Image (cartoon, helix red, strand yellow):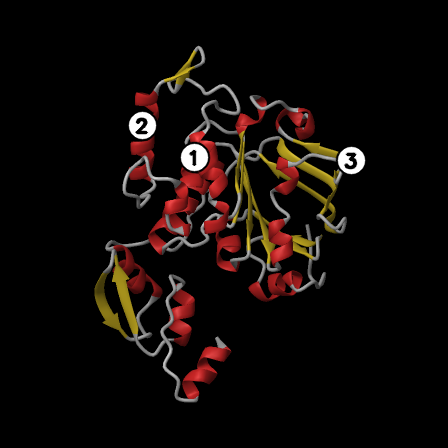
Amino acid sequence: MAIMRSLAADGKSILFITHKLKEVRAVADVITVIRQGRVIDTVPPTETENQLATLMVGREVNLTVHKEATQLGEPVLELRDLVVRDDRGLAVVNGVTLSVHAGEIVALAASRATDRRSWPRPFRECGPSNRARSLCAVSTSRIAHRGPSSTRVWATCPRTSARRSRPIDERRRQSRPQYAAPRPFASRGTRNLKAVEENATQLVQRFDIRTTGIDATAGSLSGGNQQKVIVARELSRPLSCFMASQPTRGLDVGSIEYVHRQIVNQRNEGLGVFIISSELDEVVALGDRIAVIHSGKITGVVAPTTSREDIGLLMAGSTMGAHD
């Protein structure tokens, strides 16, 4: 932001394209709102975030995440002394101990890219480089010992980008699923294509996925719509634990509102939810507990009522003011 202000002060013209309301209000002299390829309005930066969101989406948007008190259940995810090493053998997650209970959202605040990218790798790759004394899932059985069918109660939503869309396309085109597809999508080893297509059509509408049709590949979609595809896929089946890294990355405010509401609904229905995000607003809005990681280590676990200044210090590596 400081660089853009400096350039503007030097007489440079800047066209700044973003969906982040705080950023655009902080730096813009004039704000033009575009929705579905058309100019909706041009307004001053004195407009409130709610007013801008309404222009962007075409309806009122609730930017506040409402959460009711829930009864915590048993731990559905338990990490003890988790260590994850990168391709160079360096520990990018170093001795993390953390638990997620049924009926709660634990938000992991990670400002450094390395800290974010390390998750959810240990849950996909439970190998020798990912050491933990106990890496537990549903019913406290070790993730590494669970078969493909049993891990269907898990959902992971990694961050997406254009170059990461190929695996989504490849999985979509597989002639055989990685595990037995549930009814009504398959029966006795035969896919029910009509049921698959009807379900895809419903999810495209429900999650507002902007696409030319259900036969379009994920790689042909924008980054935000790729993210919607993954969220739709994972939240459209029965789960016990849901984990997402940067769940609203690249989404517009209307889609962010919807995804946040779906995540809270999963928590209200008794799921354990683990969110990894660099967005402090998102972490504070969603988390029942906030764990902060810096350089691979947890610097504190705090309540969402903790001041942003204290959380910011923890994200910078300080342990001052940290509490359980």
Outermost residue to the bottom: 10
Determine the CA span between mark 2 and mark 1. Answer: 13 Å
Image label count: 3
Name which residue type carries label 1.
Arg
Q: Is mark 1 on a helix, strand or loop?
A: helix
| Mark 3, residue position | 133
Pointer 2 or 1: first along the chain: 2
Q: Is mark 2 on a helix, strand or loop?
A: helix
Q: Looking at the image, is mark 2 or mark 1 nearer the viewer?
A: 2
Residue kind at label 2, given as amino acid type: Glu
Disc 2 residue crowd, few under 14, some 14–19, many 20+, Cα 10 Å: some
How far apart are labels 1 and 3 at the CA level?
A: 31 Å
Image position, residue 68 (x, y; %): 45, 42
Residue 62 visible somewhere in the drawing: no
Separation of marks 3 and 2 at Cα, in angstroms: 43 Å
Residue behind mark 1: 233
Tell me whether circle 2 and circle 1 mark residues in contact (CB < 8 Å): no
324 in relation to 240, above or below: below
**Corner quadrant of residue 9:** bottom left
Mark number displayed over residue 197: 2
